[in-house]
Image (tube, grey):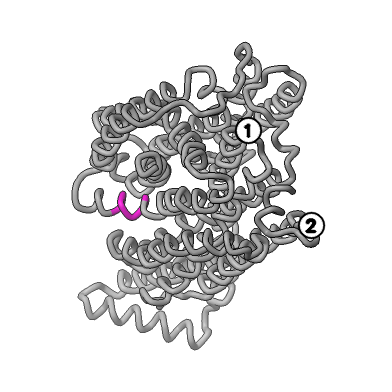
Amino acid sequence: MITVIAAAVMELIDTSIVNVALSYMSGNLGATLEDTSWVITAYAIANVIVIPITSFLSGKLGRRNYYIGSVILFTVCYFLCGQATNIWMLVAFRFLQGMGGGALLSVSASIVYELFPKEKQNIASALFGVGVFVGPTIGPTLGGFITEHYSWPWIFYINIPIGIAVMFICSSLLGEPPLKPTIGKIDWAGILLLAVGIGSLQTVLERGETDDWFSANYIVVLTAMATLGLVFFVWWELRVKSPVVNLRVLKSKNLSVAATLTFVSGVGIFSSVFLTPVYAQRLLGFTPTTTGLLLLPGAILAIGGLLVSARLLQRGISPVVMITTGMLLFMLFSWRMSGLDLDAGERDISIPLILRGVGLAIVTVPLSTLAISSLAPKDIPQGTALNNMMRQLGGSFGIAMVNTYISRRNAVHRTDLIGHIIPGDPLVMERLTGYTNYFLDKGAGTQDARRQALGLLDNVVVRQSNALSFGDTYLLIGLVFLLALPLLLLTRRKKGSKPQVALADH
């Protein structure tokens, strides 16, 4: 159990550890920052294509062979990524690594659930949830520390010993599941449609904001391909006898609701992990190490929250109550972060991050348990794969959403602030005179001092616009959680039934 959770943590760290190292890679490999961002995009595309078909691949190749093979591929690609001599080599190796990483998440979850009887799967959800939550949280922190003190290839090399250990331990301990899924002939059409649909969608989400969305022809084409690919994929999978992804498991109301809310939690987990380090480092001037220390208390308390929430579920606390509580805590985090200004200190950020950590921890276990609670044992791998895919898609959607929203709100706030800088206004002239005198004291000429003062005033406007835009974006994420809350009404248990029974029967 420890081994497969470590593998899942390793995969989830890898989804976010690269983010803070892009500028270092760009300079070292002689690539533009736009080209370097494909290092993230390629991994995400491969990952999200493979995750939903892991159940099929496990059945066709044998779970043990597929899982260990994926660990080997993932670990070898760590070494190859660190050895890449140009940006497109690195992108190719990251794509291969994403293919291997899909199994480390979904198959690991299935193995953990299999180790516990049905009545104790809340504990399984909590233990696996530690990896799900901690991985994306510490990824940027670890990446920032390594790139700040060493060099970017070490963000890949550092995980190689873990991958080797997982490979050898799984070779000794991992067996086949007690109930093997029945696999017919290979559904090549389904695999192709899934790759086209999900791959196109992921590319649009990852690259849309960078290339100004539908002003780029390839984004328009990929959007059409994603729509047609996914529509035909659903149609084909529901009519074929041996589908590569068994969408019929979504007839389970629990799985459908849990998958939707897992998508929302993915938006919260990944977008907040993306926003907060950027806000702390670019606007408040914190170092990557300091930012990582701000995230640490919330991550530690989240681990305790995951285990406590599992115990509360076993004692009969309604999962609806727990999910609602967790989502409300996350909304409180969003509201507190939206009120920060450029004078915010470490304490102003660390307390909301604790609310975030505990809130998402309380949500994770009930959702994971809910997703598989009404599934037959043979359908659990497919259910966990779909649920994990929704979390990853939620993360991609969340990051694309906040990037676009920040850009739009920044333009609005800049226009609004500039409208208040009126020539002749006493406050404006006082500020400008103070800046001019500062540069005059530093030895600048009159014209240069005036020009530098105007530049400094513009810089103040830019920083204030960014701060206001980040505040608006935190509120937007909280609004997404608020709009998702009514879905919990669909998970009500029958009158007179025990919470755990209701969780299993609905």
| Most common SS among magenta residues | helix
Image coordinates for residue 248, horizontal then vertical, percent: 72, 31
Classify residue 374 as left or right of residue 429: right
Image coordinates for residue 124, horizontal then vertical, percent: 49, 48
What amino acid is found at the position of numbered circle 1 in the picture? Asp
The quarter of the picture where residue 49 lies is top right
Image coordinates for residue 135, horizontal then vertical, percent: 40, 49
Q: Which residue is mark 1?
A: 379
What amino acid is found at the position of numbered circle 2 in the picture? Lys
The quarter of the picture where residue 482 lies is bottom right
| Numbered disc in front, either 1 or 2 | 2
The answer to whether residue 229 is seen in the rendering is: yes
Q: Real-space Cα distance between discs 1 and 2? A: 24 Å
Q: Does residue 13 belong to the magenta stretch? A: no
Q: Which residues are magenta?
A: 139-144
Q: Give the position of the N terminus as an image quadrant.
A: top left
Image coordinates for residue 351, horizontal then vertical, percent: 44, 74
Q: Residue at x 28, y 44 (%)?
A: 24
Q: Which residue is mark 2?
A: 494
Dot 2 crowding, Cα within 10 Å, few <14, some 14–19, many 20+: few
